[in-house]
Image (cartoon, grey):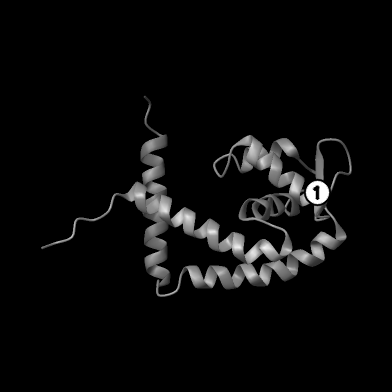
């Protein structure tokens, strides 16, 4: 008897949950979560990034209260400072610690694509991008 494929929504949710669980475990010893790591990546790429920019860039990843809590975590942990009200900047210590965390994240990424060829990965990404385009471009 042929197995019926699982719905894509189910698989996407399971994948995201697994990514978050393992990433949170990987980053936990640094006092970070996957979401806080994403905040740090937005801040490190900016020059005096604003809270509003972080909320905008990561709006697909979490709601505003969760993102605000992640921002607060990075500030409380000394990763990020507030050079002015509503602005965020990576601290010198945060910059140094980010390099160490980066090696752990690289290992996590390697683990997450084990057994998946670059071609398969590329196909998966293109399929998901097309699904997003199909659903976001339609006028309801």
Q: In which quarter of the image is residue 29?
A: bottom right
Q: Where is residue 42 in the image (x, y as percent from the top left)?
A: 69, 50
From the viewer's perspective, is 43 left or right of 116? right
Q: Which residue lies furthest to the right in this view?
A: 83
Tally of marks: 1
Query: What x and y, as percent, mark residue 107?
Result: 58, 73
Q: Quadrant of the C terminus?
A: top left
Q: Which quadrant, please, contains the N terminus?
A: bottom left
Residue at 80% x, 49% y is: 75
Where 87 sits versus 125, above or below? above
Q: Nearer the viewer, residue 50 or 35?
A: 35
Residue visible at 42% across and 35% down? 136
**Position above or below: 105 against 58:** below
- Residue 33 percent coordinates (x, y): 65, 55
Q: Is residue 70 left or right of residue 139?
A: right
Say what secondary structure mark 1 lies in.
helix
Q: Nearer the viewer, residue 78 or 89?
A: 78
Answer above or below: position of 1 versus 56: below
Q: Give the quarter of the image for residue 125.
A: bottom left
Q: Name the residue at 74% across, 38% down.
A: 51
Q: Residue furthest top?
A: 140
Residue 78 x %, y %: 83, 55
Q: Mark 1 points at which residue?
A: 75
Badge 1 crowding class, 10 Å Cα cut-off, few under 14, some 14 to 19, many 20 or more, is some
């Amino acid at each position: 008897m042929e197995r019926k494929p699982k719905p894509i929504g189910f698989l996407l949710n399971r994948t995201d949950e697994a990514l978050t669980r393992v990433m949170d475990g990987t980053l936990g010893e640094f006092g970070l979560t996957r979401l806080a790591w994403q905040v740090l990546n937005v801040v490190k790429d900016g020059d005096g990034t604003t809270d509003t920019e972080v909320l905008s860039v990561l709006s697909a990843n979490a709601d505003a209260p969760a993102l605000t809590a992640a921002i607060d975590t990075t500030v409380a942990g000394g990763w990020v400072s507030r050079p002015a009200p509503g602005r965020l900047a990576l601290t010198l210590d945060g910059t140094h610690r980010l390099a160490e965390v980066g090696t752990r994240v690289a290992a996590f990424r390697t683990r997450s694509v084990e057994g998946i060829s670059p071609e398969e990965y590329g196909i998966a990404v293109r399929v998901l991008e097309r699904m997003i385009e199909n659903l976001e471009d339609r006028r309801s």
